[in-house]
């Protein structure tokens, strides 16, 4: 078990408070991509960051924002390392992050019961998972929603529409 010092916890809080560049309603800690901050001397730290997917275009902006935040708190040397193992999963989004997504009008991802590879279905717009755990409209809460497009403003979101209130909304896809 790895233990962290009080200063490392403070630095995790600072780095974790950086907003996600693509979903500024969430912090990096709420999104679950900030893995650790390790002290390396009096004013140097190593930060471990796991992107939402390997080709995530926001990883560079996240790294620069973390460096800036830690520099503002007196840390002179900040090294941000991309860590791919364990891979990020939508299960890493905190309950607070899920609440904020819903309030922002984005249906949060459903939690996955299984681990391992994510099944990919290319067939109809409703999957067995949706029948058991439907994507709920963040506006009215209805489970009667339909997929309009597998991709939305970012690759990690799908575009859906509520059949009850007729409002379109983004759904943060499960990974």
Image (spheres, grey):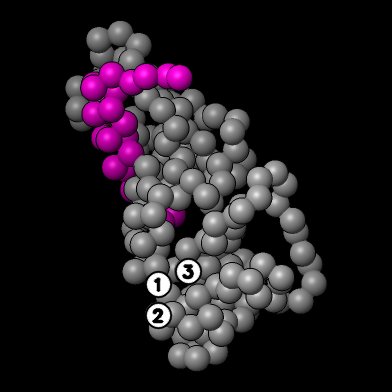
Q: Is residue 15 in the magenta section?
A: yes
* Residue bearing the label numbered 2: 139
**What stretch of residues is rendered in magenta?**
1-23
* Residue bearing the label numbered 1: 105
* Residue bearing the label numbered 3: 107
| Residue neighbourhood size for the residue with mark 1, other residues' Cα within 10 Å, grouped as few (<14), some (14–19), many (≥20) | some
Q: Report x, y in % for residue 115.
A: 66, 45
| Residue neighbourhood size for the residue with mark 2, other residues' Cα within 10 Å, grouped as few (<14), some (14–19), many (≥20) | some
Q: Secondary structure at mark 3?
A: strand
Q: Is residue 95 left or right of residue 52?
A: left
| Residue neighbourhood size for the residue with mark 3, other residues' Cα within 10 Å, grouped as few (<14), some (14–19), many (≥20) | many
Q: Is residue 95 in the magenta section?
A: no
- Tell me the residue at 48%/83% (across/down): 142
Front-lying residue, 125 or 95? 95
Is residue 149 in view?
no
Vertical arrangement, residue 42 with respect to residue 38, above or below: above
Front-lying residue, 86 or 161? 86
């Amino acid at each position: 078990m790895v233990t962290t010092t009080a200063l490392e916890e403070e630095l995790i809080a600072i780095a974790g408070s950086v907003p996600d560049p693509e979903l500024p309603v969430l912090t990096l800690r709420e999104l679950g991509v900030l893995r650790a901050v390790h002290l390396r001397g009096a004013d140097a730290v190593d930060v471990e960051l796991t992107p939402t997917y390997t080709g995530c275009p926001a990883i560079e902006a996240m790294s620069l924002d973390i460096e800036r935040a830690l520099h503002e708190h007196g840390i002179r040397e900040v090294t941000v390392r991309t860590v791919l193992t364990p891979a990020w999963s939508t299960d890493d989004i905190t309950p607070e992050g899920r609440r904020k997504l819903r309030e922002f009008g984005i249906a949060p991802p459903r939690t996955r019961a299984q681990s391992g590879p994510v099944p990919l279905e290319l067939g109809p717009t409703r999957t067995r998972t949706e029948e058991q755990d439907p994507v709920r409209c963040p506006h009215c809460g209805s489970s009667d929603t339909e997929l309009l497009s597998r991709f939305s403003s970012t690759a990690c979101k799908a575009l859906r529409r509520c059949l009850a209130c007729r409002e379109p909304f983004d759904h943060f896809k499960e990974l």
